[in-house]
Amino acid sequence: MAIREIRQVGDSVLTKKCKTVTRINHRTKVLIDDMKDTMYDYGGIGLAAPQVGVLKRITIIDIGEGPIVLINPEIVASSGSQTGEEGCLSLLGKWGMVSRPEAVAVRALDENMEEFEMSGEGLLARAICHELDHLDGEMYMKLVEGELQDVVEEVEGEEESQETDAKPDGSEDVEKSEEIKRLEEEMARTMAEKKQVEADLKIVEEELKRREELEKNEELKKSEELAEEKSCE
Ligand code: ZN
């Protein structure tokens, strides 16, 4: 059991196609255990073997419901579409919007080389797609819609929850409630500004009314004068 170094973008190991696993030996078992330790230590929700420098088709995922080990995984069906924030432990400090299927079905081998099928939707489907891409040397950046974003320091906890290789703990809730508080404060400010604008508008409207009244009076006066002039003719 050990925490391994996570390879970062620029490391060629992340761009290579991984090899099919033909048998599980002691080294593979240690690798899987280390991958779990590493993923949890970094606060990820998924990790693929190439991210720790091993070109084998092995990935682990845990979106908070316990670890799933997928060996030689293949997506056998997918449906729907979801667009959301995605990040990666191999590209820390960045995130981007990525569209993925809403649901996928996967066929893989477990740690005992037994074939099984599973399906996932939402975050799990996103994590499965993200990790399987790693096994083909692909990363999420080329799927990003718009710009790749920098993670802002103050919402780092949120970044971790957004990351597909991210943390399935309660830090998201804390960040969320802080975010909600911030939004509420902003809303209160906006409402106060709106009130001010409305008050200003009322003053302007009254001023307009006053002028209209004045103009009306003047017109009345003029027409009276005209009438007077006419009657004098
Ligand atoms: Zn990743």
Image (cartoon, rainbow, N blue to C red):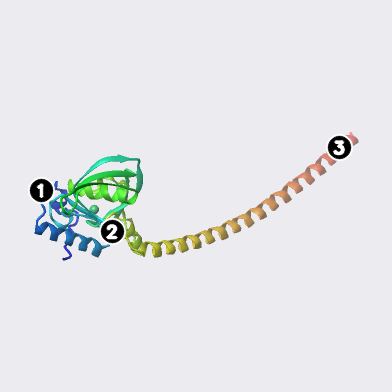
Q: Is mark 1 within 8 Å of ligand 1?
A: no
For the residues carrying marks 3 and 2, which lies nearer the camera in this image? 2
Earlier-in-chain disc, 3 versus 1: 1
Residue 106 vs residue 184, the one in the foreground = 106
Q: Disc 2 designates what residue?
A: 66
Earlier-in-chain disc, 2 versus 1: 1
Q: Secondary structure at mark 2?
A: loop
Q: What is the C-alpha distance between the residues marked 3 and 2?
A: 94 Å
Relative to 151, is 74 on the left or the right?
left
Q: Residue furthest right?
A: 232
Q: Position of residue 170 (x, y in %)?
A: 36, 64
- How many circles with numbers are drawn on the protein? 3
Q: Residue at x 29, y 54 (%)?
A: 164
- Circles 3 and 2, Cβ within 8 Å, touching? The answer is no
Relative to 30, is 89 on the left or the right?
right
Q: Residue at x 44, y 63 (%)?
A: 177
Task: Classify mark 1: residues with Cα within 10 Å, few (<14), some (14-19) or many (20+).
Answer: few
Tell me the number on the disc at residue 227: 3
Q: Position of residue 129 (x, y in %)?
A: 26, 47
Tell me the number on the disc at residue 22: 1
